[in-house]
Image: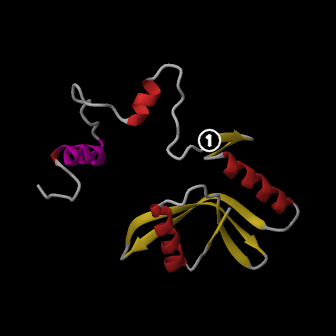
Amino acid sequence: MTRIAGFGEVEYEKHQQEVSGQSPPSTAAGALPRSREIAAAAPGREPVSKYRNQPVVVDGVRFASKKEARQDAKLLLRQQHGQIRGLQRQVPFPFVVNGTEVAEYIADWTYWEGDAFIVHDAKGRKTDVYKLKKRLLKALFGLEIRET
């Protein structure tokens, strides 16, 4: 068996089962369940998101946060007034290196503002993964992310 840094035998087996589509074995006796299961199991408690954002549904569209929903309303209004055009939500940008997709960034919105193509993201917390994907988007596509 090939060792992967940070993976013990149990983690490796679980990963292999997930990749192959098999369900992982149930939690061993005495082991703690995952945090989402704990939150779901606690009577009368709603699960709390990792970054404390509150998902919201507006006009049948689910947004990851109230901030994202407010920004979407502003962009829709700007499009109605002709300030922007071609507004799209949740646009994927695959990061392909040597013919292999290594990651993907999903922009909250893309649109045209005059002759400029804009990639827009409602950001609460800038994680290390987000910062890396932001740099990859610039390097591979030549695009900057407008953050609100």
**Residue in the picture at 56% in, 43% down:** 52
Hey, which residue is sitting farthest left in the picture? 1
| Total number of numbered discs in the rendering | 1
Q: Is residue 63 above or below residue 144?
A: above
Q: Position of residue 120 (x, y in %)?
A: 66, 65
The stretch of residues the image draws in magenta is 10-21
Hey, which residue is sitting farthest right in the picture? 81
Q: Secondary structure at mark 1?
A: loop
The answer to whether residue 94 is seen in the rendering is no
Q: Is residue 136 above or below residue 122?
A: below
- The image quadrant that residue 102 belongs to is bottom left
Q: Position of residue 109 (x, y in %)?
A: 66, 61
Q: Quadrant of the C terminus?
A: bottom right
Compared across the picture, whether 52 is left or right of 112 comes to: left
Compared across the picture, whether 64 is left or right of 67 comes to: left
Residue 106 in magenta stretch: no
**Residue in the picture at 60% in, 55% down:** 124
**Residue in the picture at 21% in, 25% down:** 29
**Residue in the picture at 36% in, 35% down:** 34
Q: Quadrant of the N terminus?
A: bottom left
Compared across the picture, whether 13 is left or right of 128 comes to: left
Q: Position of residue 140 (x, y in %)?
A: 49, 78
Residue highlighted by disc 1: 55
Q: Amino acid at mark 1?
A: Pro
Q: Is residue 58 above or below residue 148?
A: above
Q: Nearer the viewer, residue 13 or 38?
A: 38
